Amino acid sequence: MAEQEHPSQNPTNHITEEYRILHKVAQILQTQGELEPMLREAMRAITGFHELKVENKAGIFLANEKKKVLQLFTTVGDFSEEFLEKEKNVPFGDCLCGRVAVSGKLLMSESCYSDSRHERTFSDMTAHGHYIVPLKNSEQLIGVMFLYTNTNPVWYKHSQEVLLSIGGLIADAIQKKQVESELEEYRHRLEGLVDTRTGELRQLSHQIQKIREEEKSRISREVHDELGQSLTALKMALFQLEKKFPKENPDLKESAQSMLDLIDTTIKSVQRIAMELRPPILDVFGLCDAIAWQAGEYEKRFGIKFNLNCLQDQMDLDNDLKTTFFRVFQESVTNVVRHAEASQVDVSMSLQKDQLVLTIKDDGKGIHKDQIEGSNSLGLIGIRERVRYWNGEVLFSGAPGKGTSVEIRIPVSKK
Ligand SMILES: Nc1ncnc2c1ncn2[C@@H]1O[C@H](COP(=O)(O)OP(=O)(O)OP(=O)(O)O)[C@@H](O)[C@H]1O
Ligand SMILES: [Mg+2]
């Protein structure tokens, strides 16, 4: 079909309208939001293109390169059920749209009845013409847009350029949305993966802690019982022996006495080591007793005063959970000793609703926000991880010169 030049009587109006449409479509395609309503709005703008006599009917196919088929994505205007059903999939090369999918070129059809390429027909079909616009950018053909027109639509060169430009814009907009939704999907998948892995690692870390605690407990018992008993037996034997030493040989007696003293010191060391590994008090008595004992030890060793307000020993806590509270307490006080320059530590434990809350507060120099958030050291991370395993919460807070507080809350069910 012959290309028409501009009608010379009215070129300016025509070009103005083309640019107005182009501008409007570009604006619509830049808006945020869902792809489908955006494309429908763009098509409505295009169907208002008077010079082309575009009817108020149009639609967009997306190209499925793998299956070599166009898939109907959305339409504007009145289309019959039959049409929508039949046009769901149009193979590449089929009818007008399929041909454009193959050629990538703009196509104009004067009438569905006289154009032999218009292979598909519908029972309610009335005479119409078409512009079929490839939706293609520099990279690929994304889809095809079909516009219904009166029969024998105009075929101005300018209008064709505008339609091709619009096709390019729509292709870019579709591709952008597709990339965005792919990215979103990857992000989702990645987040899911990270969540799963984190959960697994947390479980593993808990398992390792548990094994370590069991090991410590076993070593503590063996050191205490076996070594302790042997040393006591040795002490008794030496004591008996010493009695038999002749009085006229005071050197021997003296040596025996210093050996007895050494055995006593060793027994104390063994007891201390066993206690430090895992205080049996934690397993035998309650958490508060264990904390009180540990606080007493710290007072003796570091000269820090403890103010204990521990009310929860009536509770029968899970052994692992008890260990978590106790280790958090130890880690927090170790930090006080190492970093805080504090003289007093207030410890409180209470049941608030269904949460067991432990607070350790010192009167030292105060932890800084950066140290809380940016800590690469294992102390605070360890506390967080131990508590998260129980779905609990941790709050570190501090102010310069006003001390540091560590608060952990863990949901507990009363047994
Ligand atoms: N009670 C506190 N008072 C003041 N600063 C603190 C206190 N507790 C922690 N900090 C600061 O927070 C930082 C991080 O603590 P964290 O326990 O994670 O590491 P660390 O004690 O330095 O090393 P480690 O891994 O051996 O525990 C410390 O280096 C310290 O600067
Ligand atoms: Mg630490």
Image: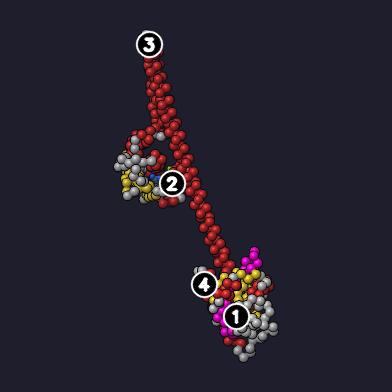
Check disc 2 and give the amino acid type: Tyr
Determine crowd level at label 2: few under 14, some 14-19, many 20+ residues with C-alpha closer than 10 A: some
The residue identified by callout 1 is: 125
Q: Are marks 1 and 3 in contact (CB under 8 Å)?
A: no
Of marks 4 and 2, the one in the foreground: 4
Looking at the rendering, the stretch of residues picked out in magenta corresponds to 50-70
Of marks 1 and 3, the one in the foreground: 1
> In terms of image quadrants, where is residue 63?
bottom right
Badge 4 marks a residue whose secondary structure is helix
Q: Are marks 2 and 3 in contact (CB under 8 Å)?
A: no
Say whether disc 4 or disc 2 marks the residue closer to the N-terminus.
Answer: 4
Badge 2 marks a residue whose secondary structure is helix
Examine the structure image and report whether residue 366 is included in the region drawn in magenta.
no
> Mark 4 to mark 1: distance in Å?
26 Å
Say whether disc 1 or disc 2 marks the residue closer to the N-terminus.
Answer: 1
Q: Which quadrant is the N terminus positioned in?
A: bottom right
Check disc 1 and give the amino acid type: Met
Q: Quadrant of ligand 1?
A: top left
Determine crowd level at label 4: few under 14, some 14-19, many 20+ residues with C-alpha closer than 10 A: few
The residue identified by callout 2 is: 389
The residue identified by callout 4 is: 37
Q: Which quadrant is the C terminus positioned in?
A: top left
Badge 3 marks a residue whose secondary structure is helix
Whether residue 48 sits left or right of residue 347 in the image: it is right
Residue 331: horizontal and vertical position, in percent? 41, 41
Give the residue displayed 60% in from the left and 80% down from the top: 125
Give the residue displayed 39% in from the left and 32% down from the top: 275
Residue 139: horizontal and vertical position, in percent? 64, 67
Residue 47: horizontal and vertical position, in percent? 56, 80
